[in-house]
């Protein structure tokens, strides 16, 4: 830890899960930034997986990938989108990673002679992690995953309690996010669950400094005072967090309720200085003034778990902001598109643009290929991302180049693995090698890689740059062998890895918008800096909607 004056804000959650702690943390980060402070946001996850990379998107939602190649919790996506600070590998830790580090140290003999225990060894490892990799930041916001009282999160709670003691009030602040349920029949907001949750936290030695109470109704002053009285707080420290119609309204709404003010007051910082919220005001104005309606069809497998597409949905939303238009998502389950050709055009009747996003496994892939064929032939804007790009290459090979056996090795052995396992590639740290027997956890091609854009290509005109850097998360890759056949038939690989071996982007020119990318551009889009590919895609879809 270089900055000895850095201030830590620990964010815990109580009462129920899914309270939007991630958004609350991201919003507070944005507000502190708007006051001129440098912030870093971190997530401490209580589960035993070393990282969320091996978890099903149905269970855990999207896996957010950082520039430095970590597979992390989706809350890190919120942090980046709200603050613009690129998340790092060191910004997400899990109980699994902490334990596996402690156990390998034990095996190495680093603790020789000692009995290894949760307190102090595991809690020390957590504290070391919280204090590590901090440079000139003014604030480090640490969100603790889960809900207070969960067995798994106890070591994290104990570690932050110790840090509170060691660093003192001038360097630590505890923010607890709770829920005030509204009981319709009584016409009342209920404070009891919040009281219990704070009691639980106090029982573990933590007195929250600020309460952020999620509520669907305004909290009457007497209720605030009641919460304050029972939770040992001042009533100004009980902040109302009213449901918002858009997540980008949250920073301004929390500011109006005094959240950043209370934090600054706690740390005895200048409270008179007003934060510069122009960025957030502008986004809200655009959101309010947007009209029209572009319908984007997302063809995927996890359509019942929309958290699996969190960054994608946000990037689409940002594309809408860039074009001042409202975007509606139509979820299309790829499995419904298999053997269903006669119904296909019906399903896509009002759709102005089609996205086939990232995905894994054979199930539903033929449905995706059918959707891609429909968008290619009917000239509906199409955006293929990672798996979506791979499926588009297969579709083109089968239906235009007449290579009927074209497939992916991800689906097992096949005659023409046009999409094959990546066995070696150049990274910033040298050559990386893999084979069929490699571990599945953390071994994909992960993180930011440069990509060269072809002169006079459509993508170059969109990015307005020659070299771009985008984030990857994939095990398979398009085989370059057929590049010239593709080119002769109108599909060009317009983005390549710097060593010219890996096709990263393709485009079809004789089409209003047909682009596939091997990376995940959605991970870098911000509301105040929409990703150029999403802005351009929504623009093309908007034009398409006007043709209907
Ligand atoms: N399953 C594909 C691969 O591993 C695509 C991954 C993805 O879409 N992120 O290459």
Image (cartoon, helix red, strand yellow):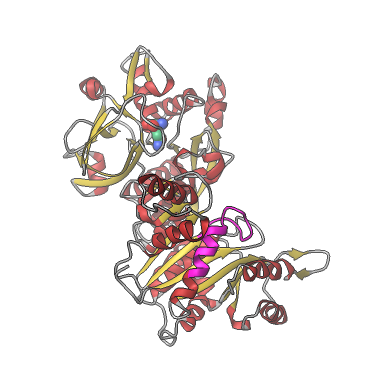
Task: Tell which of 534 and 267 is nearer to you.
Answer: 267
Q: Position of residue 396 (x, y in %)?
A: 34, 22
Q: Position of residue 456 (x, y in %)?
A: 18, 39
Image point (34%, 26%), residue name: 393
Q: Where is residue 429 in the image (x, y as percent from the top left)?
A: 21, 43
Residue 219 figure quarter: bottom right
Image point (41%, 48%), residue name: 106
Image point (33%, 65%), residue name: 134
Image point (65%, 58%), residue name: 16
Task: Tell which of 430 and 372 is nearer to you.
Answer: 430
Relative height, residue 45 to residue 480 (above, below): below
Relative height, residue 33 to residue 236 (above, below): above
Residue 427 belongs to the span the image colors magenta: no
Answer left or right for 438 relative to 169: left
Q: Can residue 395 be seen in this view?
A: yes
Answer left or right for 179 relative to 10: right
Q: Is residue 249 visible?
A: no
Residues in magenta? 144-162
Answer left or right for 18 relative to 272: right
Count of numbered circles on the image: 0
- Give the quarter the ligand 1 occupies: top left
- Quadrant location of the N terminus in the rendered image: bottom left
Task: Tell which of 539 and 93 is nearer to you.
Answer: 93
Q: Position of residue 464 (x, y in %)?
A: 22, 49
């Amino acid at each position: 830890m270089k900055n000895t004056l850095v201030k830590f804000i620990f964010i815990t959650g109580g009462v129920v899960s899914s309270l939007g702690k991630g958004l609350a943390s991201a919003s507070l980060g944005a507000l502190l930034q708007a006051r001129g402070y440098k912030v870093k946001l971190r997530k401490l996850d209580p589960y035993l997986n070393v990282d969320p990379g091996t978890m099903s998107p149905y269970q855990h939602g999207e896996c957010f990938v950082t520039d430095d190649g970590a597979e992390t919790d989706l809350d890190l996506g919120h942090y980046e989108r709200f603050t613009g600070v690129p998340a790092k590998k060191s910004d997400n830790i899990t109980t699994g990673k902490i334990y596996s580090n402690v156990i390998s140290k034990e095996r190495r003999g680093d603790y020789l002679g000692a009995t290894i225990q949760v307190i102090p060894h595991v809690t020390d490892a957590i504290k070391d992690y919280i204090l590590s990799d901090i440079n000139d930041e003014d604030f480090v916001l640490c969100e603790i995953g889960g809900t207070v009282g969960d067995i798994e999160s106890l070591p994290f709670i104990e570690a932050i309690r110790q840090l509170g003691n060691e660093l003192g009030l001038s360097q630590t602040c505890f923010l607890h996010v709770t829920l005030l349920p509204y009981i319709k029949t009584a016409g009342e907001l209920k404070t009891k669950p919040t009281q219990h949750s704070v009691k639980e936290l106090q029982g573990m030695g933590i007195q929250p400094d600020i309460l952020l109470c999620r509520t669907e109704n305004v909290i009457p002053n007497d209720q605030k005072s009641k919460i304050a009285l029972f939770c040992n707080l001042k009533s100004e420290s009980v902040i109302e967090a009213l449901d918002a119609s858009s997540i980008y309204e949250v920073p301004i709404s929390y500011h109006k309720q005094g959240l950043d003010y209370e934090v600054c007051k706690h740390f005895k910082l200048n409270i008179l200085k007003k934060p510069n919220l122009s960025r957030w005001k502008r986004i809200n104005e655009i959101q309010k003034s947007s009209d029209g309606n572009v319908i984007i069809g997302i063809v995927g497998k996890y359509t019942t778990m929309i958290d699996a597409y969190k960054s994608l949905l946000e990037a689409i939303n940002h594309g809408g902001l860039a074009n001042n238009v409202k975007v509606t998502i139509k979820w299309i389950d790829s499995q419904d598109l298999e053997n269903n050709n006669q119904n296909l055009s019906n399903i896509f009747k009002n759709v102005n643009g089609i996205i086939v996003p990232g995905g894994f496994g054979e199930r539903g892939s033929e449905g995706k290929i059918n959707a891609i064929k429909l968008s290619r032939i009917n000239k509906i804007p199409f955006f293929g991302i990672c798996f979506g790009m791979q499926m588009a290459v297969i579709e083109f090979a089968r239906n235009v180049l007449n290579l009927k056996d074209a497939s992916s090795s991800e689906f097992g052995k096949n005659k023409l693995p046009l999409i094959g396992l990546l066995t070696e590639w150049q990274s910033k740290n040298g050559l990386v090698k893999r084979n069929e027997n490699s571990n599945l956890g953390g071994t994909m091609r992960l993180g930011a890689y440069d990509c060269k854009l072809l002169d006079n290509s459509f993508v170059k005109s969109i990015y307005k740059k020659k070299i771009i850097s985008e984030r990857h998360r994939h095990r398979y890759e398009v085989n370059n062998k057929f590049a010239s056949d593709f080119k002769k038939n109108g599909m060009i690989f317009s983005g390549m890895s710097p060593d010219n071996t890996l096709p990263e982007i393709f485009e079809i020119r004789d089409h209003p918008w047909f682009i596939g990318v091997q990376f995940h551009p959605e991970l870098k889009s911000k509301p105040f800096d929409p990703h150029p590919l999403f802005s351009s895609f929504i623009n093309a879809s908007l034009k398409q909607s006007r043709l209907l």
